[in-house]
Image: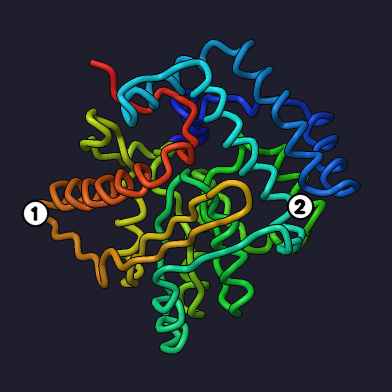
Amino acid sequence: MTDEPPRTGWLGVAERGSVLGIWFLVWLSTAFGRAPARFALRFIALYYVLLHASIRRISSEYLRRVHGHASLAMVYAHVLRFAEVALDRAFIVSGKLKYFKVTCTGNHYFKELAAKGRGAILLGAHLGSFEAMRTQADREGLRINVLGYFRNARMINAALHKLNPDANARVISIDPSNFHFVLSIKERIERGEFIAILGDRGGSDGRVATVAFLDGKADFPTGAYILASLLKCPLYLTFGLYRAPDRYDLFCEPFEEEITLPRDGRDRMLQAYAQRFATRLEHFVRLAPDNWFNFYDFWRKP
């Protein structure tokens, strides 16, 4: 493990935009509501599509994989959808849920775990909005903590912290130079809380498996399965798909009750788990293709 995450892949993508632009959107949404802010996003998305060739290229590659073809209009719609979901985070975090409709599929799994006092790992992806899932859990008295790298999203996270300072109490930042975050995970699982991990981006430890995904080969991290095996807790899949203009469809389904990694064949088992996750993720991606928000070179190049 290195002291700093690698500057390639998604960790090397600088947070785009400016502090002024982010705060302008937060102010606009706070002062005038969701509709005017969403209107402003149309021009912001157009700016990024026209002036950032890398975004056009990466979005086009993904769209061709999922649709078989891509156009500039499709790329614009993809980027706009990302911006809309990102803006909704501000409303969701600040508790302004009146703007949204929410459907829940598999929500009974959370209630069953809570009744038993069992913690679990929730494995999601950069698909739609996990914030909607966490907020729905809050409304039902469940605690979801988000584990991940947050260095490449400092500005938007700072803005969200201003809207709801309590939100950061449930964020666990991975720090390769300090393993106290592992103890924090263990304590929260033992208290019957949930740890959410977005399982479609590798970190700095190099623990990935190359699996089939959307007619190609991509690297998926294996840390969530290792963590679940160490903590001896169940692992569930969770996704929150955005449906324009104001609906979020939340899904939860069991993945593995207990993950065991034998010494012999450990890598093979991790590969199998990563492939299972990628297969289910592809299913949900195809349900809402415009909800896929990985704007970097995701597929392994020959």
| Quadrant in which residue 24 is drawn | top right
Amino acid type shown at disc 1: Asp
Quadrant in which the N terminus appears: top left
Of residues 134 and 173, which is closer to you in this image?
134
Residue 274 drawn at (x, y percent): 25, 47
| Quadrant in which residue 86 is drawn | top right
Of residues 92 and 206, which is closer to you in this image?
92
Residue 149 drawn at (x, y percent): 54, 43
Crowding at dot 1, Cα within 10 Å, few <14 / some 14-19 / many 20+, comes out as few
Q: Which residue is mark 1?
A: 264
Q: Secondary structure at mark 2?
A: helix
Q: Residue at x 45, y 86 (%)?
A: 117
Q: Residue at x 34, y 42 (%)?
A: 286
Quadrant in which the C terminus appears: top left
Q: Residue at x 51, y 16 (%)?
A: 72
Q: Earlier in the sequence, mark 1 or mark 2?
A: 2
Q: Is residue 98 above or below residue 22?
A: below
Distance (Cα) linking label 1 and label 2: 45 Å
Amino acid type shown at disc 2: His
Q: Is residue 277 above or below residue 140?
A: above
Residue 65 drawn at (x, y percent): 31, 27
